[in-house]
Amino acid sequence: QVQLVESGGGLVQPGGSLRLSCASSVDIKSIYQLGWYRQGPGNVRRPVATIRNTGGTDYAKSAEGRFTITRDNAKNTVNLQMNSLKPEDPAVYFCHAAVTYTSGLQNYWGQGTQVTLSS
């Protein structure tokens, strides 16, 4: 099994920045894809940013140009730098890993970290 632990959430002003971090219990070089999803007021979990073990990335349109996802193989972490935060961004952010096995692909989730904007 893969355990994922998020950190870095908190309260930030509109226009401010936060950096989220996710620590994996296994070597992230063995993980096919890592990513960040968020679950906001609509209670639907949607992808924000993903990064594959080949280095390719994808971003939600709303995050494009403001958020950056990176991997640190030495520390087994995946990070999400969030800049220019907007009122639409508050949510619980979840770390996700897609891991391949001989039997197929399995999905793993962290417990989430809350991002809140001050007024």
Image (cartoon, helix red, strand yellow):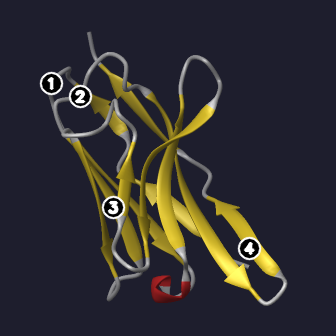
Q: Quadrant of the N terminus?
A: bottom right
Mark nearest the camera among 4 and 3 is 4
Circle 3 is placed at which residue position? 79
Q: What amino acid is labelled 3 in the image?
A: Asn
What is the number of the mark on residue 85? Answer: 2
| x and y, in percent, of residue 11 in the image | 31, 30
Where disc 1 sits, the SS reads: loop
Instruction: Please tell me whether residue 69 is drawn above or below residue 26 in the rendered image.
Output: above
Q: Spatial distance from mark 4 to mark 1, Cα to Cα? A: 38 Å
Q: Spatial distance from mark 3 to mark 2, Cα to Cα? A: 16 Å
Q: Mark 1 and 3 residues: CB-CB less than 8 Å, in contact?
A: no
Q: Spatial distance from mark 4 to mark 3, Cα to Cα? A: 22 Å
Residue nearest the viewer, comparing 63 with 1: 63
Who comes first in sequence, dot 2 or dot 1? 1
Is residue 96 at least partly visible in the picture? yes
Residue at image coords 15%, 24%:
15
What is the number of the mark on residue 82? Answer: none
Circle 4 is placed at which residue position? 105
